[in-house]
Amino acid sequence: MIKETLSTEKATKLIEATNTIVVIVDKKATKDQIKSELEKSFEVKIEKINTVITPTGIKKAYIRLKPEYKAVDLAQKLGIL
């Protein structure tokens, strides 16, 4: 379901500023599926998920973690930082 993580400059700023991770997901994946996969795999709680389909047909998920979890720690587990 999660294809890859984004490690662009904007994605890195979101990690630090808003506790948000950006990942590329399967186009058919729902927000509930993305949430359950991440919460089970990495033992974090998710506050909010926003998805967008880019003009090139790629689906991005912006995943904001609850304040008691740090996106920096998750990014290190995912290999972004």
Image (cartoon, rainbow, N blue to C red):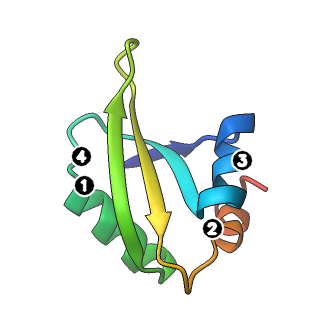
Q: Mark 2: which amino acid? A: Ala
Give the x, y percent position of residue 44.
48, 80
Q: Mark 1: which amino acid? A: Lys
For marks 3 and 1, give the one nearer the viewer.
3
Determine which residue is flagged by label 2: 71
For marks 4 and 3, give the one nearer the viewer.
3
Determine which residue is flagged by label 1: 31
Task: State which tag comes first along the sequence, 2 or 4.
Answer: 4
CA distance separating discs 2 and 4: 21 Å
In the rendered structure, find residue 29 and report the number of the disc placed on it: 4
For marks 2 and 4, give the one nearer the viewer.
2
CA distance separating discs 4 and 1: 7 Å
Give the x, y percent position of residue 11.
64, 43
Quarter where residue 60 is shown = top left
Which secondary structure lies at badge 1? helix
Determine which residue is flagged by label 3: 13
Q: Residue at x 45, y 49 (%)?
A: 62
**Residue 73 seen from this side:** yes
Q: Mark 4: which amino acid? A: Ala
Q: Mark 3: which amino acid? A: Lys
The reply to whether callout 2 and callout 4 are in contact (CB within 8 Å) is no
CA distance separating discs 4 and 3: 25 Å
Q: Is residue 30 above or below residue 48?
A: above
The reply to whether callout 4 and callout 3 are in contact (CB within 8 Å) is no
Q: In the displayed structure, does residue 20 sit left or right of residue 35? A: right
Task: State which tag comes first along the sequence, 4 or 3.
Answer: 3
Give the x, y percent position of residue 58.
39, 25
Which secondary structure lies at badge 3? helix
